[in-house]
Image (spheres, rainbow, N blue to C red):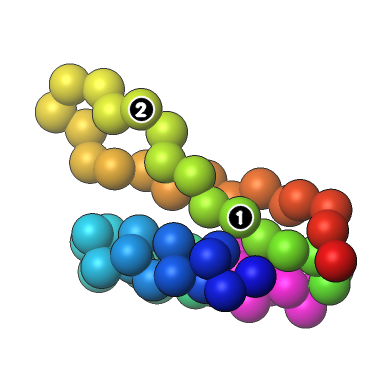
Amino acid sequence: MEYIKMKFENLLQTASKESKKKIKKELLYKSLMKSKILLLYLRPKKKNEKKRFHIWNIYGT
C-alpha cells in the first residue's frame, strides 16, 4: 500500500495541472464507490502527446 501511494505521488508530480485535477476526481469517485486498491499506470506516449493517466481497479487487501 505504501509503495502504491509513493508511486501515485510521483505520477502527480510529473502530471500537468489538468491531469492532476482529473486524477484526483476519478480517484475520489472510485474510492468512494469501491474500497479497492487503486493503481495508476502510464500509457505509452504517442508523438506530440502529453502523458495520459489511466486508473485501474485492482482487487487486493
39 or 47: nearer the viewer: 39
In the image, taking residue 39 as reference, residue 31 lies left or right, namely right
Local crowd at mark 2 within 10 Å, few (<14), some, or many (≥20)?
few
Q: Amino acid at mark 1?
A: Leu
Gap in angstroms between the C-alphas marked 1 and 2: 16 Å
Find residue 39 and name its label. 1
Please tell me whether residue 27 belongs to the stretch shown in magenta.
Answer: yes
Amino acid residing under circle 2? Pro
User: Circle 2 sits on which residue?
Assistant: 44
Report the number of numbered marks.
2
Q: Looking at the image, can residue 18 be seen? A: no
Q: Does residue 27 show up? A: yes
Q: Nearer the viewer, residue 11 or 17?
A: 11
Image: magenta residue range: 25-33
Q: Is residue 16 left or right of residue 10?
A: left
Q: Position of residue 19 (x, y in %)?
A: 34, 60
